[in-house]
Every structure is written in C-alpha cells, then in structure tokens.
Amino acid sequence: MPLTVSLWEGDGLLHLNAGFTRLREQREWITAAALEREVFKRTVLFGEIAHIGDSTLLHGGVRHWVKREKLAVDLSLQRLHLGSGNHNGGVIGVSWYEL
C-alpha cells in the first residue's frame, strides 16, 4: 500500500508503505516512512525508517542529481537494529535511472 504526499509546495515528498511478507515461516508486517526535501538546486536531503519483524533500519543522507531524474550520487549513513544488536554503516551510491 504505497502512498506519496507532496509537501512544501512541491519541494518535498513523504512516502508511506505498508504490507506483508513471509519470512521465517511466518507472515510479518513491513512498514516504512521516508521524507525527502530539495534544499538546493538538484540537491535533496532524505531520511527513512523501515521496520520488518524485529528489525529496524534508519537511513538518511544527501542526494545530488547530476542530471535530473537520470543520474544521482548519494552519500548516506544507516543504522540497522537487529535482535542481536546494532550495525552502523555508510553508503556511497551512484544511481542511473532510465525512466
């Protein structure tokens, strides 16, 4: 059940998702919320939280669109909480979209 809402007169978006998955021989809820906002020309701050079973992912960073809606570079940090503890990391990503 995805839902996206435009915020800040089109400069930002709120994404909400909910659903089920079958993991560990049982059905589990998946929920996620993400927020993004353009802060400079072609530069977006983003953050998200996702939850499935007893695991939670926090992820946030900055995305710069080298070419709008085609080529992006991301720098972000994430924290994954599992039943066994927390795991932290950084992500450097290059994304190419052919929309």
Image (tube, helix red, strand yellow):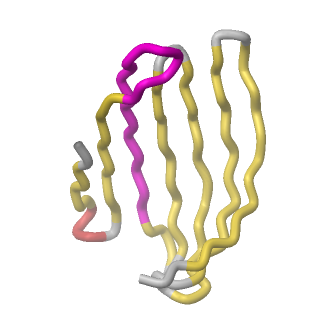
- Residue 38 versus residue 53 in the image, above or below: below
Give the percent coordinates (x, y) of residue 65.
Answer: 56, 79
Q: Position of residue 8 (x, y in %)?
A: 27, 62
Q: Which percent across, then down, holds residue 47? A: 50, 47
Say above or below: 72 vs 8. Answer: below
Check if residue 14 falls in the magenta segment.
Answer: no
**Labels in figure, total:** 0
The residue located at (70%, 60%) in the rendering is 75
View extreme (front): residue:
25
Specify start and end residues of the magenta stretch as a single range.
21-37
Q: Nearer the viewer, residue 19 or 17?
A: 19
- Residue at screen point 37% across, 18% down: 27
**Depicted 54 relative to depicted 80: above or below:** above
Q: What residue sits 48% from the left and 36% below the top?
A: 49
Residue drawn 33% across the image and 69% down it: 11
Instruction: Depth check: give the residue in front, 66 or 21.
Output: 21
Q: Position of residue 15 (x, y in %)?
A: 32, 50
